[in-house]
Image: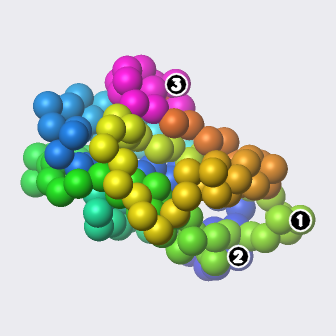
Amino acid sequence: MEKEEYKKIPEFVCVIDRSRSMYGKEKEIIESFNAWLARQKRNKKELLVTLALCNEECELLYSRMPVKYVKPLDSFTYFTKGYTAYIDRVEEVLELLSGLMPSAGENQKEVSLYLLTDGLDNSSSEEDREEFEKKLESLKKRGWKIHMSGHGIQESFERIGA
């Protein structure tokens, strides 16, 4: 697929907290993501998926990958470890993507950003929460749909792409 074609395809960006405070929620996260993924594949619509798993580090599983190539999560790809520096890592992912996305005023396309965290034990040291919220507001002004969830994980995935 050519770079110009990518500019027209809707995008789904998902950043999932994998810190130890998420322990006990692994099965629900895996099942919910996989159900969402199966629905997207059944729709047979083009969609680019970015999926990052974050704690004090960020593991980028997919970056703007066509949904048909995205594999379901399992207990080998999603497991909890480390501490929460979620805001720092989300900012890292957004910084990476901002260089790949059309600028404000260019061809706007649908981008959904889904942030999944329990919000506990946030030890982010590089990014300030207020600055992070300003960044999210600027993305909303560019037309991004922002979804943040911490509870009701399954219901959240159902709402964002039934």
User: Of 21 and 93, which appears nearest the observer?
Assistant: 21
Q: Which residue is mark 3?
A: 159
In the rendered structure, the answer to whether residue 126 lies left or right of residue 61 reads: right
- Of the residues under marks 1 and 3, which one precedes in the sequence? 1
Side (left or right) of 29 relative to 92: left
Secondary-structure class at tag 3: helix
Q: Amino acid at mark 3?
A: Arg
Q: CA distance from mark 3 to mark 2?
A: 30 Å
Question: Dot 2 corresponds to which residue?
Answer: 4
Task: Please give the name of the residue rendered at 71% of the width and 61% of the height, measured from the top-left corner.
Answer: 8
83 horizontally vs 53: left or right: left
Which mark sits nearer the N-terminus, 3 or 2? 2
Q: For the residues marked 1 and 2, what is the alpha-carbon distance in whole angstroms?
A: 16 Å
Q: Which residue is mark 1?
A: 105
**Is 57 placed above or below 35 here?**
below
**Mark 2: secondary structure:** helix
- Mark 1 and mark 2 lie on one chain; the one further toward the N terminus is 2
The amino acid type found where label 1 is placed reads: Gly
Asked if residue 126 lies in the magenta stretch, the reply is no
Name the spot of residue 87 as percent of width and height, x first: 46, 55
Determine whether the residue tagged by mark 1 lies in a helix, strand or loop.
loop
Marks 1/3: CA–CA distance: 28 Å
Q: Is residue 137 above or below residue 4?
A: above
Discs 3, 2 touching: Cβ within 8 Å: no
Magenta residues, as a range? 149-161
Using the image, tell me which numbered label, if any, was put on residue 45. none
Q: Is residue 158 magenta?
A: yes
**Percent of width and height locating residue 54:** 32, 57
Residue type at mark 2 is Glu
For the view shown, which residue lies furthest in the right direction? 105
